[in-house]
Each structure stands twice: as structure tokens, then as C-alpha cells.
Amino acid sequence: MRLFATLSLAAGLILVAASQLSAAGEGPAAPSAPAPKPSEFYAAMPDGSWLLAGAGTYKGRDAGKEPPFGILGFSGMALDAGHRKLLVFGGGHNDYWGNEVWAWDVDRREWQRKYEPDQFISMKLEDALKGVDNKKQPGVWLPSRRPITRHTYGSICFLEDKGLMLAGGGSTYSGPNRNKVDFWCDVGNPGGVWLNGPADIWLYGLEKNEWTYKGSGKAEGAKPDFPKGCGTSTYAPDIKAAIVVSDATWLYDAEKDAWTRKGAKCPGGGHSVMTYDTRRKLAYHVGRSGKELKMYSYDPAKDVWAEVKAEGELPSNRDGGWGITYDGANDVVLAFGRDGLAVFDPKTSKWEKNPGKPEKAPAASEWIFNRFQYDAANNVAFLVTGTRDWRVDVWAYRYRKPAAAGEAAK
């Protein structure tokens, strides 16, 4: 049983192609806006420090003003830098039933549930069967046109040029009976409701607060130029495309709403995450590969995957699910997982665990996935993590102050 199996509520994510559009399209490109201003709250953070920016509370959680712990189960998030929000979507299996999006305002430091979830937790199987079409639209809850709750794993990324969150994932909500998987119909249970792995892809926009179904690789008549789901993804701003790893390596151009299947296949393991190095124009992929963490780089211009031969204190990698994010001001990759914090320097190809040994830090945790995101405006990386007593905390980490970062870049 998973770590989150005894806990309360949350929601799920998803993404995929234009061959089976459902309701509204994703709309025009996000309007340009002034660069966000840094918040005074984070300004005094010293180098190598953590700050508890949003402490979870029982009162807030139970009143529905803070996200349920279970939404974090094997799930990720995106940073919508333009709206200054962290967008959390996940849950699934027996961790959480709800399919809502939660947004955390990085300046006001408060949560908001963006819409009420569909009430899967109280549904009878015969009623739930009326709300799905597993042949033509796998993964869609038809009454609301929203994704069925699931683990989103490392599938989530943010399409900056469109102002949209892309999501996929798998291991959908298994049903109200916690000890069974009544609602799964593709695991030896033909009487179930929906697919455990619908292989679908979705886009979510905060501006309109709506989801757009892009399709599923398992749909009847699915085209070969569409991915079979989304295992992990990252956004490459220089080519304005999402890099998606599933059955192959894919590029998604949201402006053209077009998928391109690339020839190179990612050699990395499962339970993986990615981030994008904007200086070297490389995607870094970290997945489950033996006892030590292995990193691979992908060059979209050359369509080449290569193992990153790293030295130093390599983080352990028993189960994967590390959170990684690229700190562009300091030109380092920040990772958080079962060893706590680890920093990778692309210039030296070396890892360092818990640099500076800060006095105050979040507890080391597995299954972070995309819930560790660097915010350039504040020069901090935000971490959303669960506590041992089932609350959701938000932490901020600063590797180095802007002035020091400028010196380091010389």
C-alpha cells in the first residue's frame, strides 16, 4: 500500500493530442504581461536557506481552505509564473478521489481551490458507468468534461507561451472501497468503470479555469502521431515546445497544436522527472535506475539522449520520484527527495548533498515529482510537500542571492 493510502482527498492531471478535442479549445497565446516583481517576504533569505512559506493547518485542511494531503500522492505541480501561482493536481488510486486544481499564491501565500471536485467518493458503480466513454474518450468524466482523478507523476509542465498547464499520468481513482479496485476496468475487472491507465493528455488554463482534453493514445482510432500518454515532461522555452517522454520522445507545439515523434528514445527509468537547462538548451531526465540516481540529457536540436556522467555525492535513487528544477540565476539543478536537497552543477558535472547544512529544512521525502519549481522572480525554488501528520506545507529554498549569482556567472 502506498504511503498516502490512508489519507484524505485530492485531484488528478492529464494531457494529449488534438485528434479528439472535446469542449473548448485552448485559445490564443497568453497575453504578454509585465515581468512579475519579487516579493519582500523572500528578499531577506540568505544563501543556502529554507523558509517555511506556507505551513499547513488541520483547521484549514478540514475547512476545505487548504489541499487534502492525498492530492500529493505520486503527483506533481506547475508554476504559472505570470499569475504567480503554484498549480497542484493529482491524487488517484486510493490516495484521493477529487479531481480539482489547487492554486497557491506565492505572494499572498494562500491556497485556493479552483472548482469543486466531482464526487467520485460517493458514487455507486452503476452511476459512474454512465459518465465515461472508455472507447472514444478514455480518462474523461463526461458530465464535467474534466479529467478523472489520477496520479500525475512527472507528467506536469507549464507551457509558458500559452499560459497552460499540460498533464497526463495514470493510476486513476480506484473507487470508494479502499481495499479494492472496483472502478478499474483494465486490470482483470471487466465490470469496472474506467481505465487505470487512460493514456490521455490535457491542458488546464487558470485564466478560464477550464480543462481541454487533447486525446488519448488508447482511444478508438487514435492516430500514430499521438503519444500513448505522458510519463514525464518539461517545457523548452527556446523552441516553445513541451518535451514529453512516454512510448517515445515527443515534442508538443501548443501554438500549432501539433505533436512530433522523435527518433531517439529516452534510456532513463520509471517514476521520472525532467527539467530544462535554458543555458545549454538541454532537458535533464532523472528516473529510477538502480541504487544511485542517474541523469540523462536530451538535446532537442540534435535529437540525442546521453547519460550525464556525474561525480560527487550522488543522491540515492531507490524508487525515483525526485523533484528537480533548474535554477537559471545560479546555473544549477536543484533536486529534492529521499536524501533531502541535492545540487548538480552542470559546469563541473558534480553533485553535492545538502550544501551549507541549513538548520531549518523540510523533512526528506520520496515521490516529490514536479512539486519543486524554481521561481525566477523571487530567486527561490518552491517545494510543496506533505508532513507526517498529513498536512500540506509550502517551502522556499534559496541557493544563492542574485548578487552572488552574478559573481558566480563570471
Image (tube, rainbow, N blue to C red):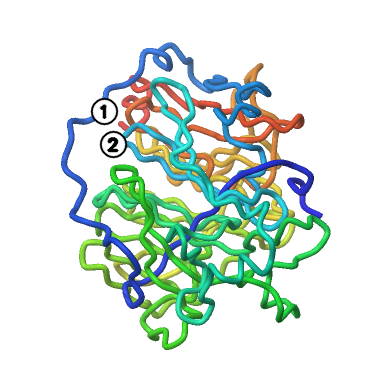
**Residue 36: numbered disc:** 1
Q: Residues within 10 Å of mark 1 (few under 14, many from 20)?
A: few
Expressed as whole percent of the image width and height from the top left, the position of residue 142 reads: 47, 65
- Give, as a three-letter code, the residue at label 1: Pro
Q: Nearer the viewer, residue 117 or 370?
A: 117
What residue lies at 62% left-to-right and 62% top-to-bottom? Answer: 172
Q: Is residue 175 left or right of residue 72?
A: right
- Give, as a three-letter code, the residue at label 2: Gly
Give the mark nearer the N terminus: 2 vs 1. 1
Furthest residue toward bottom: 221
Specify the quadrant of the image occupied by residue 263.
Answer: bottom left
34 is higher (above) or lower (below) than 255: above
Secondary structure found at label 1: loop
Expressed as whole percent of the image width and height from the top left, the position of residue 66 reads: 57, 30
Q: CA distance from mark 2 to mark 1?
A: 7 Å
Secondary structure found at label 2: loop
Expressed as whole percent of the image width and height from the top left, the position of residue 238 reads: 25, 54
What residue lies at 62% left-to-right and 31% top-to-bottom? Answer: 392
Q: Quadrant of the C terminus?
A: top left
Q: Residues within 10 Å of mark 2 (few under 14, many from 20)?
A: some
Q: Is residue 180 left or right of residue 276?
A: right
Do residues under tags 2 and 1 come within 8 Å of each other at their CB atoms? yes
* Residue of label 2: 82
Specify the quadrant of the image occupied by residue 126.
Answer: bottom right
Q: Quadrant of the N terminus?
A: bottom right
